[in-house]
């Protein structure tokens, strides 16, 4: 994370999350920091920023407080719109501020053509069934101005997978292989400017780790044990240690389990 310029953004987001009473997460430590870095590079007070599927993410309010762009935290779920509004209250933001939480469908955005400078979709479009991710990407292209930037993060796998339910998410989720990334997310109007993929550490490191925690893991995958036991909620501050110890970053999607993609509209 240090070499990729993400660690300093993790630290700032960590402090921001504490203000919001929002926990940090092993994988979001990377996804959120990657997104914040690109937002910091392209946003200013005159910009328009749209976050898709904001949920409980601290990123929209974090970037708003840093760059003061007109910011839209968007969701389909009223519960999470209320969560973003509660963040506004915690931070002392009001209706006079240029931060808006509003309902949006990623496949049918209400924003005008070429009206947005920065769009982010952090672990969001993989949950839209059918060709929803493809239609969402088309919408992102439509609303972005030329030179505008898009960040998308998604789970990846060796083979393309569509799950109707997982133990950690009560709904549809797809995982992308390299071919699906290209066919479903890459578009001729978008130039890729950075891509980072989350991969496992060396087999020798993993072997030593699994031996050291054999009693805890009992042969199961470490991340499954972490989330199934609810330790992500109980011990959230440990997340950065697991991120740094058990996730490597690569520009190659081979063998990865998550991808962070930054595009620029031509």
Image: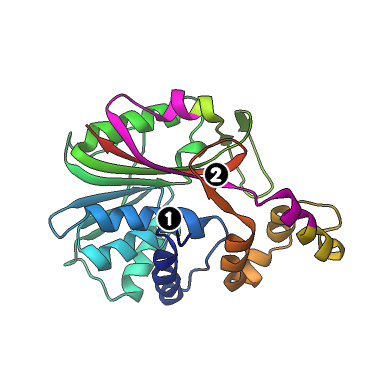
Q: Where on the picture, by quarter, is residue 66?
A: bottom left
Kind of element beneath mark 2? strand
Q: Residues within 10 Å of mark 2 (few under 14, many from 20)?
A: many
Q: Where on the picture, by quarter, is residue 84?
A: bottom left
Q: CA distance from mark 2 to mark 1?
A: 16 Å
Q: What is the x, y in percent for residue 172?
A: 58, 37
Q: What is the x, y in percent for residue 140?
A: 30, 36
Q: Which disc number belongs to residue 4? A: 1
Residue 76 covered by magenta stretch: no
Q: Residues within 10 Å of mark 1 (few under 14, many from 20)?
A: few
**Please, is residue 218 above or below residue 157 in the view?**
below
Kind of element beneath mark 1? loop
Residue at 32%, 69% (x, y): give it: 88
Residue 72 visible (yes or no)? yes
Q: In the rendered view, does 77 fall on the left or right side of 193?
A: right
Q: Camera-side residue: 7 or 123?
A: 7
Q: Camera-side residue: 27 or 93?
A: 27
Q: What is the x, y in percent for residue 155?
A: 55, 41
Q: In the rendered view, does 161 fall on the left or right side of 107?
A: right
Residue at 32%, 52% (x, y): give it: 38
Residue at 50%, 60% (x, y): give it: 29
**Residue bounds of the magenta highlight:** 181-207
Q: In the rendered view, does 93 fall on the left or right side of 207?
A: left
Quadrant assignment for the C terminus: top left
Tag in front: 2 or 1: 1
Q: Camera-side residue: 199 or 175?
A: 199
Q: Camera-side residue: 12 or 133?
A: 12
- The residue beneath circle 2 is 258
Q: Where on the picture, by quarter, is residue 205?
A: bottom right
Residue 183 covered by magenta stretch: yes
């Amino acid at each position: 994370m240090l070499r990729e310029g993400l660690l300093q953004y993790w630290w700032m987001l960590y402090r921001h999350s504490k203000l919001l009473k929002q926990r940090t997460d092993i994988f979001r430590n990377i996804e959120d920091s990657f997104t914040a870095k690109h937002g910091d590079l392209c946003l200013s007070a005159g910009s328009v920023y749209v976050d898709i599927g904001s949920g409980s993410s601290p990123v929209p309010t974090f970037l708003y407080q840093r760059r003061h762009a007109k910011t839209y935290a968007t969701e389909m779920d009223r519960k999470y719109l209320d969560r973003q509004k509660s963040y506004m209250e915690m931070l002392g933001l009001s209706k006079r501020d240029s931060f808006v939480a509003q309902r949006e469908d990623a496949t049918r955005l209400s924003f005008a053509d070429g009206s947005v400078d920065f769009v982010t979709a952090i672990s969001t479009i993989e949950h839209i069934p059918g060709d929803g991710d493809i239609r969402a990407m088309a919408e992102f292209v439509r609303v972005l101005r030329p030179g505008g930037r898009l960040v998308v993060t998604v789970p990846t796998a060796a083979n393309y997978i569509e799950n109707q339910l997982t133990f950690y998410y009560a709904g549809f989720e797809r995982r992308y292989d390299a071919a699906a990334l290209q066919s479903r997310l890459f578009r001729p109007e978008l130039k890729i400017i950075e891509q980072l993929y989350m991969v496992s550490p060396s087999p020798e490191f993993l072997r030593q780790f699994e031996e050291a925690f054999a009693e805890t893991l009992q042969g199961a995958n470490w991340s499954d044990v972490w989330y199934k036991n609810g330790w992500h909620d109980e011990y959230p501050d440990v997340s950065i240690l697991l991120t740094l110890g058990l996730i490597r970053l690569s520009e190659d999607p081979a063998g990865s389990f998550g991808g962070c993609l930054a595009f620029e509209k031509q």
